[in-house]
Image (cartoon, rainbow, N blue to C red):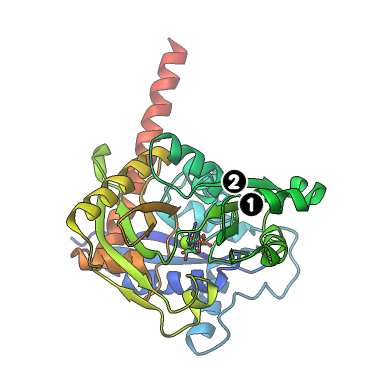
Amino acid sequence: MTEARRRLGVIFGGATVEHVISIRSAQAVMAAASTKRWQIIPFAVSRDGLWLTPDESSRALSIIQKGGREEIAAPAAPRSNRVPQATLAALVACDAVFPLIHGTSGEDGVLQGFIETLDVPYIGSGVAASALAMDKARCKQILREVGIPVAPGIAVSCAAWRDDSVAVIRNASELGYPYFVKPSRGGSSIGAGRVDSREEAADALAAAFACDSEVLIEEAMPSPREIECGVLGSPDGRPPVVSPFGEIRTQRAFYDYIAKYEDPTTELIAPAELDIDLAKQLRHTAVEAWHAVGAEGMVRADFLVDANGRFWLGELNTIPGFTSASMYPRVFEVAGIPLSELIDRLVALAIERRSNAADGRASLDREARQ
Ligand SMILES: Nc1ncnc2c1ncn2[C@@H]1O[C@H](COP(=O)(O)OP(=O)(O)O)[C@@H](O)[C@H]1O
Ligand SMILES: [Mg+2]
């Protein structure tokens, strides 16, 4: 007897600057998922945050596949509801869903909370870990507390910037030049910039504050190597698996938006050449960080490493890119785990978490009745 295929929902697009990357991540996941095991149900979300039905999502994907614009257009007919009934019904009928919206509203706990409310197993971190990893200012506080090296710096609110921008620029200059500014809850290097002199400060800070109400000002690591690894959860609460390391090389001043998505000379090298002791420290740090934020399923840990082997954990990404050019699937491929197997493992973890949560609820109910 053949095993029935199970329904795997893939959620992509979304009201984020990484809309196109999300579509590409979803296309790669859908192409790789085992057709023997999974019936893929697509859930496209437009740039305005409107959810399409699975039928509309399939149509949107086939238009893109035929060379149409890489964008999920809003449904033609006006809707009173962001999530139509047919979409909700299809979501709750899924055996598991794979949220693949990067950044705001997809990776920051909002989408996770919505799926949690529907009581459907989903891949990746839960609400709290997603929100924490997305909020660089708060995440750094927690990482620092457990002894993980992060860039020294300060967080500044837009109120402080509005009240006394001269004082903010003066405080920032105490870090020395150059320093980095970035939105606390950002991504894809949008709004991030290097400040080489006092003259550049006001524009760079204004650009960062245009993206978020809180901005990080950090000491810059000079000419850092950009080293990344994937972390993958293990069943039964066993320690997570850390992938081999990958390295990004860019010819630009830093790994900015253009280097990430437009510059053809940006190189992704996997496996990266790393000193054995350094690799050991980075692996250990990635696992510590995973536990510190309470991550589940998957995380990509991004490090900055200087010429002397000193390193900072730059950030944790709870929904890393899954495009054919992305680091997370690449480093696991190097480890001998192809994307189809990675998907199977991630789904199994999602289902395990849901059943543990259900067991927990049942035992609380029993206690309450006693
Ligand atoms: N403190 C720093 N020192 C040196 N480079 C930095 C620093 N902070 C950020 N960068 C550069 O900016 C890029 C984007 O910063 P990051 O914190 O990873 O934000 P994002 O979430 O937008 O990717 C990094 O990959 C790195 O090239
Ligand atoms: Mg980054």
The kind of residue on which mark 1 rests is: Ala
Which sits earlier in the primary sequence, circle 2 or circle 1?
A: 2
Expressed as whole percent of the image width and height from the top left, the position of residue 21 reads 50, 72
Residue at (32, 68) in percent of width and height = 247
| Numbered disc in front, either 2 or 1 | 1
Q: Which residue is mark 2?
A: 154
Expressed as whole percent of the image width and height from the top left, the position of residue 189 reads 55, 66
Q: Secondary structure at mark 2?
A: strand
Q: Quadrant of the N terminus?
A: bottom left
Rendered image: mark on residue 32 = none
Q: 291 or 218, which lies in front?
A: 218
Expressed as whole percent of the image width and height from the top left, the position of residue 289 reads 37, 44
Residue at (41, 51) in percent of width and height = 124
Is 39 rendered above or below residue 355? Answer: below
> Dot 1, how many residues are within 10 Å of its Cα: few (below 14), some (14-19), or many (20+)?
many
The kind of residue on which mark 2 rests is: Ile
Is 261 rendered above or below residue 132? Answer: below
Q: 333 or 206, which lies in front?
A: 206
Q: Which residue is mark 1?
A: 172
Q: Secondary structure at mark 1?
A: helix
Q: Identify the residue at the far bottom of this view.
A: 67
> Dot 2, how many residues are within 10 Å of its Cα: few (below 14), some (14-19), or many (20+)?
some
Direction from residue 134 to residue 74 in the image, left or right: right
Is 273 rendered above or below residue 299? Answer: below
Q: 296 or 193, which lies in front?
A: 193
Expressed as whole percent of the image width and height from the top left, the position of residue 201 reads 68, 62
Can residue 263 be seen?
yes
Q: 54 or 238, which lies in front?
A: 238
Residue at (67, 72) in percent of width and height = 74
Are dots 2 and 1 in contact, CB under 8 Å?
yes
Direction from residue 185 to residue 322 in the image, left or right: left
